[in-house]
Image (spheres, helix red, strand yellow):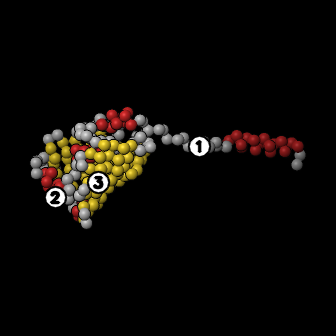
Amino acid sequence: MTMRRSLAMFMCLAALAGCATVRHAPQPAAAPAPWDERLGQLEHAASWRLDGRAAAALGQQGWQATLDWQQHGTVSDLHLAGPLGVGSTEIKVTPAGLSLNGAAPSGAVAAQLEDKLGFELPLDNLRYWLLGIPDPSIPFDLTRNAQDRALRLSQAGWTIDYDEYMPASGDLMPKRLVLNRSDARVRIAVDHWQGLP
């Protein structure tokens, strides 16, 4: 091979090397905001949604359902599909009261819902617990995890264990949580968060 050919080959290899894609290590996820900062944001979250699944154990009985929760200000829209063999249950919580399957709010709805689900669902508190924070209106005990998020919350006669978090809106949001009371155990798995602050 002549010197000229060797030089031409070297220059081609050098040019190809210059075109190679440089791979960078993936950037680490941003650290979640401190608890006190995130707590205030989530307490005042005006509009958000989650999709997931819920399963309840009540002694030897129980049920499973898909879960769709939409929060709009002080209004909670909850859709459960599948509990107790029923096609679906629509629950709406507004300042005017609790309504079931599109009926007007009434004092009897809470009893109907408890009869349908098998236990009293703590809807006023649950809108906060799903976000991984306590209801700010009543006393609570809270233990935080290494990521400065809720690990165990005790409030309103329930204990909520946060088993797993997931990235959402640049933060960590609950992915798996378990609600326990003396007569009921509810497991919630979140598949998707949307609209968080």
**Mark pair 2, 1: CA separation:** 55 Å
Q: Secondary structure at mark 2?
A: helix
> Tag 3: residue type?
Asn
Q: If you read the primary sequence from the N terminus, does the residue marked by circle 2 or circle 3 appear first? A: 2
Residue drawn at x 18%, y 58% is 116
Within 10 Å of disc 1 (Cα), the crowding (few <14, some 14-19, many 20+) is: few
In depth, the one of 93 and 57 nearer the eye is 57
Which circle, 2 or 3, is nearer the viewer?
3
What residue type is disc 2 on?
Asp
| Residue 32, picture quadrant | top left
Which amino acid does the dot numbered 1 rest on?
Ala
Q: Nearer the viewer, residue 86 or 115?
A: 115
Distance from Cα at disc 1 to Cα at disc 3: 42 Å
Q: Position of residue 195 (x, y in %)?
A: 34, 40
Q: CA distance from mark 2 to mark 3?
A: 19 Å
Image coords of residue 51 (percent x, y) = 33, 50
Residue 151 is marked as none
Q: Secondary structure at mark 3?
A: strand
Picture disc at residue 115: 2
Q: Which residue is mark 3?
A: 180
Which tag, 2 or 1, sits closer to the chain's start?
A: 1
Instruction: Please say whether residue 61 is visible from this viewpoint.
Output: yes
Few, some or many residues within 10 Å of mark 3 (<14, 14–19, 20+): some
The quadrant of the image that shows the C terminus is top left
Asked whether the residues under the numbered discs 2 and 3 touch, taking CB atoms below 8 Å apart as contact, a structural biologist would say no
Q: Secondary structure at mark 1?
A: loop
Which residue: 27% across, 45% down?
Answer: 155
* Residue density around tag 2, few if under 14, some if 14–19, many if 20 or more, within 10 Å: few
Q: In this figure, which residue is indicated by the disc labeled 1?
A: 25
The quarter of the displayed image where residue 5 is located: top right
Q: Nearer the viewer, mark 1 or mark 3?
A: 3
The number of discs equals: 3
